[in-house]
Amino acid sequence: MQGGRDSLAERFSRLAQETPDSRRVDLELRTLDVVLSGFLLLITLPLTVPIGLANVLSSGRPVFYRGERVGRGGRVFTMTKFRTLRPGAETRLGHQLGESLVTATESEVTGLGRWLRRTQLDEIPQFWNVLRGDMSLVGPRPIRPRFFEELAEELPAYWQRLVVRPGLTGFAQVRRGYETSMAEKLAHDLEWIADRSVRLYLRTLGATAWRILRQILHV
């Protein structure tokens, strides 16, 4: 609350909850999320311990990065990834957003972290977020609460991202990349929300897998 009135973020969160966009396909997508994330957690388990040890030996603790993100209906959850930045980087980068954040982050990435990012192995712990129901494998990328209100102020349609679970990957990530403007990313996210289906879900996962494979082959 700000001055006795709801903040813009709170109003948008309530609007998302009061304007449900529940469809039959959402149950199908959630079923796929549970099955696939459970399977992926099992097959990546042998990588978890070596990556954790390498992180500690190369740059100390913590092994994981845990950060608050805005989820479906405005609910805040803790997203987990393998840490790829130097300890304390979150504090130093906290005020950055968009392209300036990408640029500033480059100086904070550890040697191991750069490899984890290129291969996307830093994302493995997020399969647990998907299994828990905080996230989906496909959807708008989750955003920090501190940035949500800024973007909601700038982009009036931003609240619509809250009607679905945030995703591990999405249209914006597959089609363009980190250099895409926030307005362009939002357009891709809204397209997914409007047209979401099992077919698009599987196509997006396939495109993501192909993109990761190409990155690994070029490491």
Image (cartoon, helix red, strand yellow):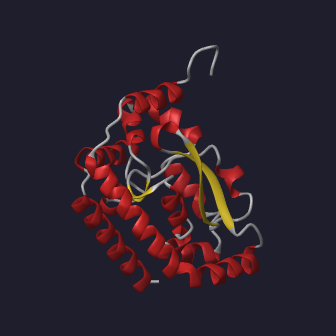
In the current view of this chain or complex, which residue is farthest to the top? Answer: 4
Q: Identify the image quadrant of residue 56.
A: bottom right
Q: Nearer the viewer, residue 99 or 7?
A: 7
Q: How many marks?
A: 0
Q: Identify the image quadrant of residue 39.
A: bottom left
Point 34% across, 55% down: residue: 172
Horizontal side of residue 69 vs 169, given as left or right: right
The percent coordinates of residue 153 (x first, y second) are 46, 28
Horizontal side of residue 23 vs 150, given as left or right: left
Is 116 placed above or below 86 here?
Answer: below
Is 28 placed above or below 157 here?
Answer: below
The percent coordinates of residue 114 (x first, y second) are 57, 73
Q: Identify the image quadrant of residue 53.
A: bottom right
The percent coordinates of residue 129 (x first, y second) are 53, 59
Horizontal side of residue 124 vs 30, given as left or right: right
Point 36% across, 80% down: residue: 214
Q: Is residue 173 visible?
A: no
Q: Is residue 68 visible?
A: yes
Q: Which quarter of the rendered picture does the N terminus lie within?
A: top right
Is 57 placed above or below 78 here?
Answer: below
Q: Nearer the viewer, residue 40 or 97?
A: 40
Point 49% across, 54% down: residue: 133
Point 51% across, 78% down: residue: 42
